[in-house]
């Protein structure tokens, strides 16, 4: 199973076929990713677009337990030189803890285990 990050969702909404293929696979997104994606859509488009994508993706959202949030904070602190966002750290740690593949195009994750890194 795949866990998509905001980068992947952004590329999906742009129609990038390298990412759109994941919509036909079994996937989830964290509630943190859903919130970040909503914020990005609202900033770059409008509330109508943000609401559309939220409704479309809502069935795939999963809540992140506080224990994973703590692991994400520790991971971010351990990798502070890479300036990885907390949203991305949460998605990555959620993926690891649930034995999923983390799908992203963020270069900070390119060589990390359990990651499907896809260039644009």
Image: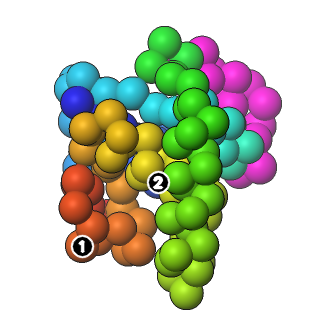
Q: Which residues are magenta?
A: 41-57
The answer to which quarter of the image holds residue 21 is top left
Specify whether residue 52 is painted magenta: yes
What residue lies at 58% left-to-right and 80% top-to-bottom?
A: 80
Whether residue 16 is visible? no
User: Would you call the spot at circle 1 few (<14 residues within 10 Å), some (14-19), or many (20 or more)?
Assistant: few
Q: Which residue is the site of mark 2?
A: 7
Q: Residue at x 25, y 38 (%)?
A: 99
43 lies above or below 98: below
First-in-chain label (2 vs 1): 2
What whole-number distance in Å separates the C-alpha atoms at marks 2 and 1?
16 Å
Does residue 107 appear left or right of residue 116 in this picture?
right
Q: Residue at x 49, y 12 (%)?
A: 59
**Type of secondary structure dominating the magenta stretch:** helix
The image quadrant that residue 101 belongs to is top left
The residue lying toward the viewer, choosing from 15 and 105, is 105
Assess whether residue 53 is covered by the magenta stretch: yes
Side of 17 where 97 appears, left or right: right
Between 99 and 41, which is closer to the camera in this rendering?
99
In the picture of the structure, the residue carrying the numbered disc 1 is 111
Residue 31, quarter of the rendered image: top right
**Secondary structure type for disc 1:** loop
> Foreground mark, 2 or 1?
1
The quarter in which the N terminus is drawn is top left
């Amino acid at each position: 199973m795949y866990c998509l990050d905001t980068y992947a969702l952004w590329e999906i909404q742009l129609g990038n076929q390298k990412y759109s293929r994941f919509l036909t696979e079994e996937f989830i997104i964290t509630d943190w990713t859903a919130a970040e994606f909503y914020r990005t859509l609202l900033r770059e488009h409008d509330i109508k677009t943000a609401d559309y994508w939220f409704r479309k993706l809502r069935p795939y959202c999963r809540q992140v337990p506080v224990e994973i949030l703590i692991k994400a904070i520790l991971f971010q602190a351990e990798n502070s030189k890479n300036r990885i966002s907390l949203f991305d750290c949460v998605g990555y740690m959620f993926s690891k803890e649930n034995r999923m593949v983390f799908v992203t195009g963020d270069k900070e994750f390119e060589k990390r285990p359990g990651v499907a890194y896809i260039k644009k």
